[in-house]
Image (cartoon, helix red, strand yellow):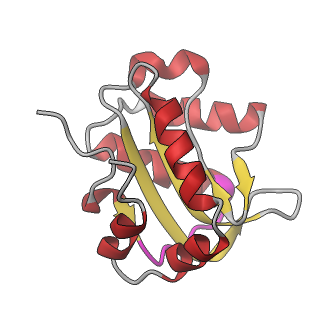
């Protein structure tokens, strides 16, 4: 049975993290805990961040693994971490929304394009940052599943 790409259990609201690394570990940890990836995927997410920042602008970061991390991915999935106070991603970039992605085969490209569409709208970002329930998040991302 395939899981939903983004499920209620994959969403953390009103989170406080101390650093970019903690934020990425938390985002990846959800993917591990929910069975989308093996634990080694988190190190690949951190490795990706060293290569190039996953900060996308508009308070959004999309941590994901490197090209060689595909062997760690069991199923395509998304984790969502809301950090209303923000976390510094370096160079003055503050992130309030972390969207962790693990894509099986080449599904991550479709997932990314759906997320990009949602996150390109400033009002969607404001709604995501101020959302008080996982259901609100799911409603905004309904096209991702």
Residue closest to the eye, 97 or 25: 97
Predominant SS of the magenta segment: loop
Residue 139 image offset from top left, x and y in percent: 35, 68
- Image: 19 above or below 37: below
Residue 84 on the magenta segment? no
Toward which corner of the image does residue 125 lie, by quadrant? Answer: bottom right
Residue closest to the eye, 45 or 98: 98
Instruction: Name the residue: 57% across, 53% down.
Output: 117
- Identify the image quadrant of the N terminus: top left
Residue closest to the eye, 139 or 48: 139
- Image: 2 above or below 9: above
Residue 110 image offset from top left, x and y in percent: 48, 35
Instruction: Name the residue: 49% across, 73% down.
Output: 15
Tell which residue pokes out farthest to the right in this image.
Answer: 91
Tell which residue pokes out farthest to the left in this image.
Answer: 1
Residue 81 image offset from top left, x and y in percent: 48, 63
Residue closest to the eye, 66 or 105: 105
Residue 51 image offset from top left, x and y in percent: 76, 30
* Magenta-drawn segment: 13-20
Instruction: Name the residue: 34% across, 79% down.
Output: 133
Judge from the rendering whether residue 131 lies leftward or rightward of residue 17; answer left or right: left
């Amino acid at each position: 049975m395939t899981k939903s790409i983004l499920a209620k259990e994959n969403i953390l609201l009103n989170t406080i993290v101390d650093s970019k690394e903690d934020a990425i570990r938390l985002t990846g940890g959800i993917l591990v805990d929910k069975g989308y990836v093996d634990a080694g995927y988190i190190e690949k997410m951190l490795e990706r961040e060293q290569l190039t920042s996953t900060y996308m602008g508009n308070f959004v970061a999309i941590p994901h693994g490197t090209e060689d991390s595909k062997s760690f991915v069991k199923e395509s999935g998304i984790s969502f971490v809301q950090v209303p106070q923000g976390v510094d991603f370096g160079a003055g970039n503050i992130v309030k929304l972390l969207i962790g992605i693990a894509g099986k085969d080449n599904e991550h490209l479709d997932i990314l394009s759906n997320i990009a569409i949602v996150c390109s709208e400033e009002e969607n970002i404001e709604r995501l940052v101020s959302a008080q329930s996982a259901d609100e998040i799911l409603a905004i991302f309904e096209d991702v599943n």
